[in-house]
Amino acid sequence: MTDTEAVDFDAVRTYTENAFPFKRYLGITFPAIDRDGATAALPERPELLNHVGTVHAGALFTVAEGAAAGAFSGGFASRADGLAPLVRTASIAFRKPARGRITGSGRIVGDVAEILDRLATDGRVSFDIQTELRDADGVTVVEATFEYYLRASSSRAAETG
């Protein structure tokens, strides 16, 4: 699929919701995914709370990483073939105690076309995806940055020299 072809973002969202068993286990959904980013949601459930009654840090990290994965899925949907992203590093700041339903947004830092050009030229590329989580009251509770790494498949590397 080329960048000029239409992308079925409902299919991308469905794939993303089903591709990650741990996120599905926690109940994370993806209400929106498109070229510009993604929204991930974590329901309010007693088993996701910590010892002080707020959402557990592990659950928050997972929904932040889910928002990043959704942003990747949407941003790279026109080139999904042969791409296997890996998270290389993560930086997370827990800003406030999180309560209730958590909604996360993720966006790729930089231009996807430029990232793909670097991948074609160098055979590998790293780039960041930033996420922000808000609680049921709309308060920012987490900010995180995930460094993603992509390597060209062996057939792609041969094509690009």
Image (spheres, grey):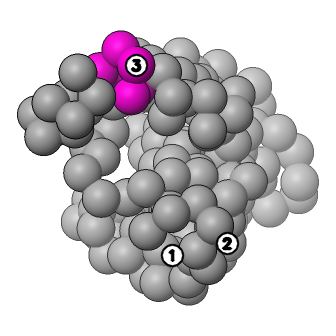
Look at the image and tell me in which quarter the N terminus lies: bottom left
Label number found at residue 32: 2
Asked which secondary structure carries label 3, the reply is helix
Relative side of 144 to 26, left or right = right
Residue 13 is labelled as 1
Name the residue: 69% across, 42% down.
107
Up/down of 19 relative to 112, above or below: below
Amino acid, disc 3: Thr
Separation of marks 1 and 2 at Cα, in angstroms: 7 Å
Assess whether mark 3 and mark 1 are in contact (beta carbons under 8 angstroms): no
The local crowd at label 3, few if under 14, some if 14 to 19, many if 20 or more residues have their Cα within 10 Å, is some
Residue 59 on the magenta segment: no
- In the picture, measured across the screen, residue 106 lies left or right of residue 58, that is right
Residue shown at the point (43%, 56%) measured from the top left: 79
Percent coordinates x, y for residue 91 in the rendering:
53, 16
Which residue has dot 3 on it?
Answer: 121
Q: Position of residue 46 (x, y in %)?
A: 48, 66
How crowded is the residue under tag 1: few (<14 C-alpha within 10 Å), some, or many (20+)? many
Helix, strand or loop for disc 2: strand
Q: Residue at x 30, y 59 (%)?
A: 81
The spot of residue 76 in percent (x, y) is 51, 52
Which span of residues is magenta-colored? 119-125
